[in-house]
Image: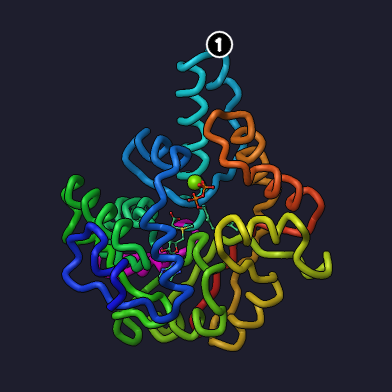
């Protein structure tokens, strides 16, 4: 077992060793992550996200405030847009009952899992490579008194502990750029019941541009990830019994979030790469919802 995995400050009963050296790198990355742009947004209402926002900025909510009060309103607005992104993902899961199980592949600190449980009343199981994130998500679930319905575990999303056909729905929210898509969709296809729904929101490079642009390469380097093309998503889904029901280009809807974020004190330095590559057409923010057939 890897030392980093074993010695992380966690309460999880069992932490498997990373399947590859790369997965060990990603586990270390997320175990060490504590950016204010994520923690201060999460502190707004206790939903901690590691994804980006969509929707129009409410400029009225930002008016007449400067200094620390203005910054507080800006943080609340960025957070509102990130939670709006999750709402749109959940809208595409179809009809989910209280007795169903949902799977969040790459669950981060669990914000989307909590929102899914609050909406559907169902069980939500998440996997992440990071013991620190799993502990954080489980701690939040406990504080909310929903630990019997919302659980995060340290597991590889390509080889999950779930039974075949166990899930009525599953998703990747900005977590598919860390894995091979054929392997990923084979695993979703295995755990989803026939007629179940898969949803992803992801950044992908646009095949119409030709190859990954400078901005896309900068984003890959910044996060140690490997952004796939839109074509690769659709091909890997088709190969794994996942038939797209909706493909939505969310690029215009995410730009206001990035332009607002670029004006805040919480910038991380990656804002320009996102804005430029969205604007030059080389990069797209997309939602794909697919039926497991
Ligand atoms: C950008 S964060 C997204 C977190 C979450 N989906 C959200 O929207 O807040 C990426 C997540 O993917 C997870 N991840 C990356 N590769 C993984 C793998 N092979 N198995 C499980 N989780 C993985 C990371 O641990 C991290 O939690
Ligand atoms: C759309 C793409 C390509 C996403 C890459 C995956 C990723 C790191 C998402 C956001 O995480 P975060 O919320 O931890 O990042 P940040 O600190 O920049 O807010
Ligand atoms: Mg963030």
According to the picture, the residue beneath numbered tag 1 turns out to be 64
Identify which residue is drawn at 42% across, 37% down.
41
Quarter of the view holding residue 17: bottom left
3 up-or-down from 39: above or below: below
| x then y, percent, for residue 26 | 45, 65
Along the horizontal axis of the image, is 148 left or right of 97? left
| x then y, percent, for residue 137 | 28, 54
The residues colored magenta run 90-106
Identify which residue is drawn at 34% across, 57% down.
113
Quarter of the view holding residue 90: bottom left
Along the horizontal axis of the image, is 12 left or right of 129? left
Mark 1 Cα within 10 Å, few/some/many (few <14, many 20+)? few
Quarter of the view holding residue 214: bottom right
155 up-or-down from 219: above or below: below
197 up-or-down from 28: above or below: below
Q: How is the image coloured?
A: rainbow
Q: Is residue 100 magenta?
A: yes
Q: Is residue 117 visible?
A: yes
């Amino acid at each position: 077992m890897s030392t980093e995995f074993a010695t992380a400050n966690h309460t999880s009963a069992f932490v498997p060793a990373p399947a590859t050296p790369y997965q060990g790198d990603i586990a270390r990355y997320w175990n060490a992550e504590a950016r204010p742009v994520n923690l201060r947004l999460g502190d707004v209402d206790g939903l901690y996200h590691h994804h980006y926002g969509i929707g129009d900025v409410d400029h009225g909510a930002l008016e007449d405030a400067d200094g620390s009060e203005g910054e507080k309103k800006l943080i609340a607005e960025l957070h509102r847009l990130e939670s709006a992104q999750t709402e749109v993902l959940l809208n595409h899961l179809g009809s989910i009952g209280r007795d169903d199980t949902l799977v969040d592949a790459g669950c981060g600190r669990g914000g989307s899992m909590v929102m899914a449980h609050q909406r559907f009343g169902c069980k939500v199981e998440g996997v992440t490579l990071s013991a620190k994130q799993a502990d954080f998500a489980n701690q939040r679930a406990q504080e909310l008194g929903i630990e019997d319905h919302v659980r995060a575990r340290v597991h590889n999303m390509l080889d999950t502990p779930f039974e075949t056909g166990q899930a009525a729905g599953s998703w990747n929210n900005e977590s598919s750029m860390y894995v091979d898509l054929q392997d990923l969709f084979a695993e979703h296809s295995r755990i989803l019941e026939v007629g179940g729904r898969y949803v992803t929101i992801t950044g992908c490079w646009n095949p119409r541009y030709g190859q990954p642009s400078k901005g896309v390469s900068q984003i890959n380097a910044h996060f140690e990830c490997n952004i796939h093309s839109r074509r690769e998503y659709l091909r890997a889904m088709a190969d794994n019994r996942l038939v797209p029901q909706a493909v939505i280009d969310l690029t215009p809807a995410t730009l206001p979030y990035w332009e607002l974020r670029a004006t805040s004190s919480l910038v991380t330095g990656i804002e320009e790469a996102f804005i430029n590559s969205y604007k030059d057409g080389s990069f797209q923010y997309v939602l794909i919802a697919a039926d497991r057939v």
